[in-house]
Image: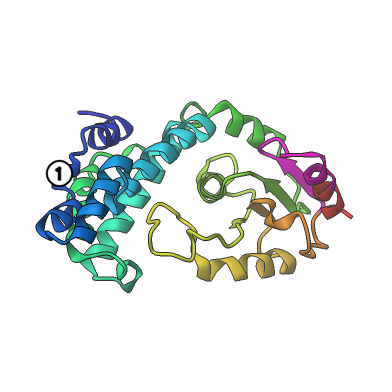
Amino acid sequence: MDSCPAYLYKIYSEYDLNKDPYIIQLRADDSERSQRALANVLMKQKTWCFSQLKTLYTTSRAIFRELGTWAVDYYISRVVRRVIQLVDLGSSYLEDWTNGEQRHLHSLLGPLDPICTTHEGPMEDSTVSDKVYQLIEALPRDRTLAGIVFAQRRVIVAVLAHILSVHPRTRTQFRVGGVVGASYHMLRSSNVCDLTDRKEQGQTLLKFRSGQLDLIIATTVLEEGIDVPACNLVLCFDEPANLKSFVQRRVVLG
């Protein structure tokens, strides 16, 4: 049986734009406006369904490189099950897109659900990247820890926070949360590949300040303008983008 990432690549690389609901809709409309739109879409190869597949594929490659095999299976599985749930429940989250587009994406990704099962087994050091392993090694086993780990990408924050919350070496040591900033994609229903739960974001910092969480993974949103007096450790999972970013992270420690 193909692995989860390999099967996803097959779906992405063999995608047939001629079967895309938006393309079919435009071709059925003989108006000049629709025909111009059709020519533009075919040239750019950009429909909602194909864009979601492309985002899922390229993001999964980045997660594999940064976080390892367990993480990429977990990420793909989360997105697939999210799509299935949103479509099956008729969620208003997808109200900007036609029922045909929703069902088409559902039909493409649905078969991945039973394949992406690696992450459901025990996590071992061999299934995470060396970068994650080094981070785990660097975390102090100190009950007074109140730390922030900075990462660049929103999706890395979400998946890394989950890894640390379930990894055998960290799950009983730390109470972990994730914080990212709002983004254009986060405020639209166009991106089903973003794992951020907007409702949880506001609670994470409150829990960190009150001591309910002792380790948070964050994007640059915590570098500036947010008071985190409880913090006594800052680690960089990714290299700071510039000197300003590096200095701001030092300031978080006070």
User: Which residue shows up at 80% across the image and 65% down it?
Assistant: 227
Image spot of residue 239 (x, y percent): 70, 35
Res. 210 image quadrant: bottom right
- Residue toward you, 131 or 156: 156
User: Which residue shows up at 57% across the image and 48% down it?
Assistant: 157
User: Which residue shows up at 51% across the image and 67% down it?
Assistant: 198
Mark 1 residue type: Asn
- Residue toward you, 32 or 111: 32
- Residue toward you, 172 or 146: 146
Q: Is residue 122 visible?
A: no
User: Which residue shows up at 52% across the image and 42% down it?
Assistant: 167
Q: Is residue 47 magenta?
A: no
Above or below 189: residue 253: above
Image spot of residue 10 (x, y percent): 24, 32
Image spot of residue 84 (x, y percent): 25, 58
- Residue toward you, 51 or 148: 51
Above or below 126: residue 239: below
125 with respect to 145 (left or right): left
190 with respect to 107 (left or right): right
Q: Residues within 10 Å of mark 1 (few under 14, many from 20)?
A: few
Res. 100 image quadrant: bottom left
Q: Which residues are magenta?
A: 232-247
| Residue matched to label 1 | 18
Image spot of residue 209 (x, y percent): 74, 66
Q: Secondary structure at mark 1?
A: helix
Q: Is residue 237 magenta?
A: yes
222 with respect to 196 (left or right): right
Q: Is residue 16 visible?
A: yes
Res. 240 image quadrant: top right
Q: Quadrant of the N terminus?
A: top left
Q: Quadrant of the C terminus?
A: bottom right
